[in-house]
Amino acid sequence: MTGLAVVGMMVAVLALILLGVRMREAYQNYKIDKELGRDSPKEMVAEHVSISLAEKGFSMSEISKPWGIEFKIQESQASKFLETFFENGSLLQGILLHPAGPKILVIEEFRRLSWHVHERKDAYLRVLRGEVNVYVSWSDIEPRPSKAIAGDLIRIPPLLRHRLGSTDGWAILAEISRDIDPDNPSDDSDERRIADDFGRD
């Protein structure tokens, strides 16, 4: 192996290490792990997450869900949200020129979101805490899940059926998206729910 090849390999390894450090920082800096145990009650988790988000300067609304909690961040803070939770947004800025729908998903252990699909939404999620089962399929038939852990990036393009579930204590994810048609942005009517553990239509 030539000297240049060795140097090139060392540079590539260093780049991977630095990328890994940035990925870890993306969720470690969220500082959500300290006071949460797998048995922490929902009210405590909600308070802890809302305080953490407020300390980072985010304004939000909190929505209780049967699977956990959803924190909707003000739309005007979408770019800041992208910078905070997605490796300074370096990988997504070229794709998400107009980021939308910033939110934090907090999923209780062994609970799952609905099996559903969007037609006008291209979503990206970063796992900030815990382990998550990720179910994806281009058909309505639900497949076996794959696993994502803290630091992993998940993309859900339009028409991809999907659901998420926590497998190890409280799981926390950041979600940002873009509207495929800016003149017809994704909203609640864009969601088609296929199956749900809680009997919701």
Image (cartoon, rainbow, N blue to C red):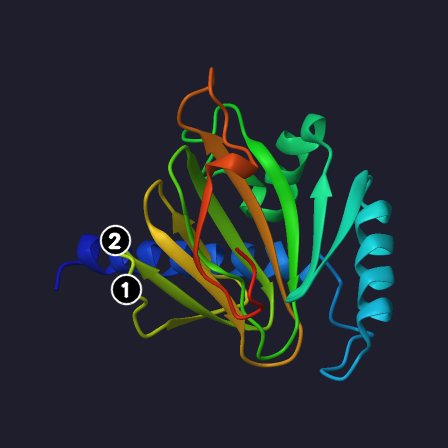
Q: Residue furthest top?
A: 183
State whether residue 105 is above or below residue 192.
below
Please name the residue shown 51% across and 36% down the image: 189
Tell me residue 53's x, y (percent). Answer: 79, 49
Taking depth in this image into account, of 57 and 136 the one nearest to the observer is 136
State whether residue 54 is above or below residue 110.
above
Tell me residue 193's x, y (percent). Answer: 45, 52
State whether residue 69 is above or below residue 130.
above
Q: Which residue is mark 1?
A: 141
Tell me residue 46's x, y (percent). Answer: 81, 62
Tell me residue 35's x, y (percent). Answer: 83, 74
Left or right for 157, reference 97: left
**Callout 1: few (<14), some (14-19), or many (20+) C-alpha neighbours within 10 Å?**
few
| Identity, as a three-letter code, of the amino acid under mark 1 | Ile
Q: Could you tell me which secondary element the residue under label 2 belongs to?
A: loop
Taking depth in this image into account, of 11 and 170 the one nearest to the observer is 170
**How far is disc 1 from disc 2 in space, using C-alphas?**
8 Å
Please name the residue shown 79% across and 59% down the image: 49
Please name the residue shown 86% across and 48% down the image: 55
Left or right for 69, reference 14: right
| Identity, as a three-letter code, of the amino acid under mark 2 | Trp
Q: Quadrant of the N terminus?
A: bottom left
Taking depth in this image into account, of 193 and 21 the one nearest to the observer is 193
Q: Which residue is mark 2?
A: 138
Tell me the mark number nearer the camera, choosing from 1 and 2: 1
Residue 82 is labelled as none
Q: Residue furthest bottom?
A: 39
Q: Could you tell me which secondary element the residue under label 1 belongs to?
A: loop
